[in-house]
Image (cartoon, helix red, strand yellow):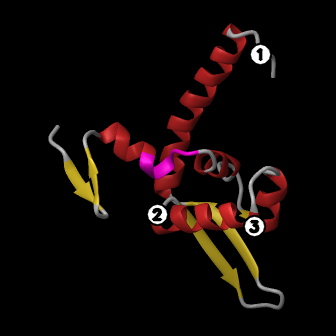
Amino acid sequence: MPEFIYDHKLYYNPVEFALDRIGGAWKMPILWRLRDKTMRYSELKKDIPKITHKMLSAQLKELEKEGFINRLVYAEVPPKVEYSLTERGKRSIEIITVIRNYGLELMKEFGIEK
C-alpha cells in the first residue's frame, strides 16, 4: 500500500493509521470501559485512577472527534455528560479484545499473574 496523508500526517501502512486512532496509553482503556455501558466523566476517572483529568479530557475529545464515542450533554446544573460508543467504537472492541487476550497470554508466559 502506498503512503498517504491524513490530517497533515504521513502514514506508511494501515496498522500505523489504526494505532494512531486507538493506540497510546489511554484510548483503548477508555473504549474498553465503554464497551457495555454509557459512563459519565467522573465514572471513567474513577475507573481509570492513574489518568489525569487533563489527559482524560484530551483523550475523550480525540475519540469523539474521530467518531469512536458519543458525548451527550444534559442541560442541567451541574452539567451532566455521558459517553458511549459509536458503531466505529464498537468495532474497535473486537481488536482491543484480541490485544487484551494476547497481553494476558504474554503476562502468563513472563510469569506475571493478574
Is residue 15 left or right of 104 when viewed as pictured?
A: left
Span shown in magenta: 20-24
Amino acid under label 2?
Gly
Please give the name of the residue rendered at 75% of the width and 65% of the height, measured from the top-left corner. 53
Q: Which residue is mark 3?
A: 41
The kind of secondary structure element at disc 3 is: helix
Q: Quadrant of the C terminus?
A: top right
Return the disc, 3 or 1, that comes first in the chain's sequence: 3
Compared with 106, 58 (above or below) is below
Q: Residue 10 placed where, x, y %?
A: 26, 52
Please give the name of the residue rendered at 30% of the width and 41% of the height, measured from the top-left corner. 14
The kind of secondary structure element at disc 1 is: loop
**Numbered badge on residue 56:** none
| Pointers 3 and 1 in contact (C-beta within 8 Å) | no
Q: Residue 66 placed where, x, y %?
A: 45, 63
Label 2 Cα crowd, 10 Å radius (few <14 / some 14-19 / many 20+): some
Compared with 107, 7 (above or below) is below
Q: Which residue is mark 1?
A: 112
Which label sits in the foreground, 2 or 1?
Answer: 1
Q: Which residue is mark 2?
A: 67
Q: Residue 72 placed where, x, y %?
A: 64, 76
